Image (spheres, grey):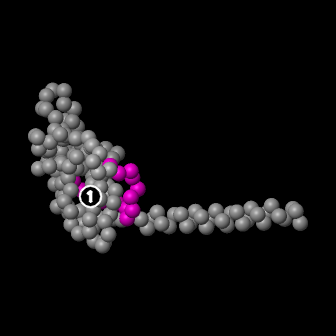
């Protein structure tokens, strides 16, 4: 009887682990939210923006603002939202190779919301640029630590005005 006992315990432990793994995986998948993105444009950052750099010989990147409108069709906010896009230069080469996540736009309320993200484009990259495969993905519950009210943000973490 003692020879069968370890087998019975291990079978029960295996079943318990499977239930826990499946049970923990389902809520995470149901938290993800896909959002539609429209009216996308890419233009140089305003000269007054914190991300703009002087046009000196030592400049290795130029600041560009990716702007658009994100649409949240659900009745609840989507939080910790990231924007993904493929940006190509005039010769069809990727401006940001091996990178499709272009930034985070934070929380998106139900309905239509405008957004703007700063991008650093390597100096000398031939324009005009084409932006494609744009999408936004977020969550129905927070997944990142948030800046508290009254806490200071770095200049590049603040809103892109203009």
> x and y percent of residue 94 in the render?
27, 46
**Which residue lies at the image location 55% right of the left edge and 67% below the top edge?**
23
> x and y percent of residue 141 in the render?
39, 62
**Which residue lies at the image location 48% right of the left edge and 66% below the top edge?**
27
Q: Is residue 155 magenta?
A: no
Q: How many discs appear?
A: 1
**Which residue lies at the image location 73% right of the left edge and 65% below the top edge?**
11
| Any part of residue 127 in sight | no
On screen, residue 82 above or below 127: below
Foreground pick, 80 / 43? 80
Query: Which residue reaches farthest front?
Result: 150
On screen, residue 97 above or below 74: above
Q: Which residue is mark 1?
A: 134
Q: Is residue 135 magenta?
A: yes
Foreground pick, 95 / 162? 162
> x and y percent of residue 33 in the render?
36, 65
Q: Residues within 10 Å of mark 1 (few under 14, many from 20)?
A: some
| Quarter of the image where the N terminus is located | bottom right
Query: Which residue reaches farthest top?
Result: 57
> x and y percent of residue 143 in the render?
41, 56
Circle 1 SS class: strand
Q: Is residue 27 left or right of residue 139?
A: right
Q: Is residue 98 left or right of residue 120?
A: right
| Any part of residue 51 in sight | yes
The stretch of residues the image draws in magenta is 129-147
**Which residue lies at the image location 24% right of the left edge and 42% below the top edge?**
156
């Amino acid at each position: 009887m003692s020879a069968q006992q370890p087998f019975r315990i291990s079978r029960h432990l295996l079943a318990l682990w499977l239930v826990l793994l499946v049970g923990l995986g389902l809520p995470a998948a149901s938290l993800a939210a896909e959002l539609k993105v429209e009216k996308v444009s890419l233009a140089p950052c305003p000269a007054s923006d914190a991300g703009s750099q002087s046009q000196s010989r030592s400049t290795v990147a130029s600041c560009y603002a990716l702007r658009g409108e994100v649409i949240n069709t659900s009745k609840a906010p989507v939080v910790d939202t990231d924007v993904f896009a493929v940006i190509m230069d005039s010769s069809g080469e990727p401006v940001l190779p091996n990178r499709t996540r272009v930034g985070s736009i934070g929380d998106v309320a139900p309905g239509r919301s405008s957004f703007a993200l700063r991008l650093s484009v390597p100096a000398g990259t031939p324009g005009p640029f084409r932006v494609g495969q744009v999408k936004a993905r977020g969550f129905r519950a927070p997944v990142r630590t948030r800046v508290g009210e009254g806490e200071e943000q770095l200049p590049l973490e603040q809103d892109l005005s203009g």
